[in-house]
Image (tube, rainbow, N blue to C red):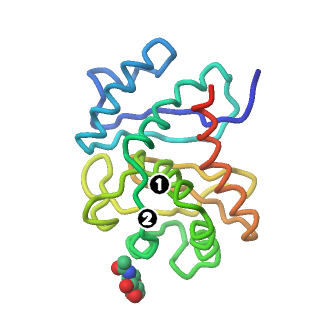
Amino acid sequence: MFSTFFFLLIQYYDRELKPGGANIPVTEKNKKEYIERMVKWRIERAVPCILFIPQVVDARLVSVFDARELELVIAGTAEIDLSDWRNNTEYRGGYHDNHIVIRWFWAAVERFNNEQRLRLLQFVTGTSSIPYEGFASLRGSNGPRRFCVEKWGKITALPRAHTCFNRLDLPPYPSFSMLYEKLLTAVEETSTFGLE
Ligand SMILES: *[C@@H]1O[C@H](CO)[C@@H](O)[C@H](O)[C@H]1NC(C)=O
């Protein structure tokens, strides 16, 4: 059985969960160890580098994503300050705060409920926990790294994310409704992983 899920491509650039970890794919077998190491990382507030790419993958891989569900539970359900988030967001590839696609993006996030916002944050940064000092002190894999939205891809693609750089690759969708739907799909698909 195949269905659309997010295929997790783990890229540990300068830090690895364990020696040689960059070359070890997460499988059913080592999932438990992966989760344990991941949780330890969370507690130490380190951010692993993960590139989330929407793809069609074998449903057998799905349970690997329990790690993300677990993280949401651990991180709790803090209320997100959208104004602080937006004020501390950078843009690349031609986007800017007043760009129509970016205005739709924030309108979409505004329409999201708090859990969906946390999932978006987790999708892009690898963790749903908000820094104690606010979005200005968001960290990437090697030091401070603000939330970033980059113009990328064709409008047929789903948004993707690089947790290493806290960067969302957002295609320039031609309408609010399309952006809303694609963004929500990218963010919510992950919730099905825990149901396996
Ligand atoms: C974000 O910036 C706006 C405009 O500069 C300001 O009014 C608002 O207070 C800021 N919000 C936060 C949480 O810093």
- At a point 52% along the width and 62% down the height, the residue shown is 150
On screen, residue 120 versus residue 156, left or right, reads left
Task: Give the crowd class for mark 1: few <14, some 14-19, many >=20 residues within 10 Å.
Answer: many
- Asked if labels 2 and 1 touch by Cβ distance under 8 angstroms, the answer is yes
Q: Quadrant of ligand 1?
A: bottom left
Marks 1 and 2, Cα distance to the nearest angstrom?
Answer: 10 Å
Looking at the rendered structure, the secondary structure element under dot 2 is loop
Mark 1 belongs to which amino acid? Leu
Q: Nearer the viewer, residue 75 or 100?
A: 75
- At a point 65% along the width and 55% down the height, the residue shown is 184
Mark 2 belongs to which amino acid? Ile
Of all residues, the one furthest to the top in this rendering is 29
In the image, which disc is placed on residue 192? Answer: none
Position of residue 182 relative to residue 87, above or below, is above
- At a point 57% along the width and 71% down the height, the residue shown is 106
Which residue position holds label 1? 121
Task: Give the crowd class for mark 2: few <14, some 14-19, many >=20 residues within 10 Å.
Answer: some
Could you tell which of marks 1 and 2 lies nearer the N-terminus? 2
Looking at the rendered structure, the secondary structure element under dot 1 is helix
Does the beta carbon of the residue at mark 1 sit less than 8 Å from ligand 1? no
| Image quadrant assignment for residue 1 | top right
Position of residue 89 relative to residue 114, above or below, is below
**Relative image position of residue 170 (x, y in whole percent):** 60, 59
On screen, residue 94 versus residue 18, left or right, reads right
**Relative image position of residue 31 (x, y in whole percent):** 45, 19
**Relative image position of residue 56 (x, y in whole percent):** 70, 32
Nearest-to-viewer mark from 1 and 2: 2
In the image, which disc is placed on residue 80? Answer: 2
Position of residue 145 relative to residue 69, above or below, is below
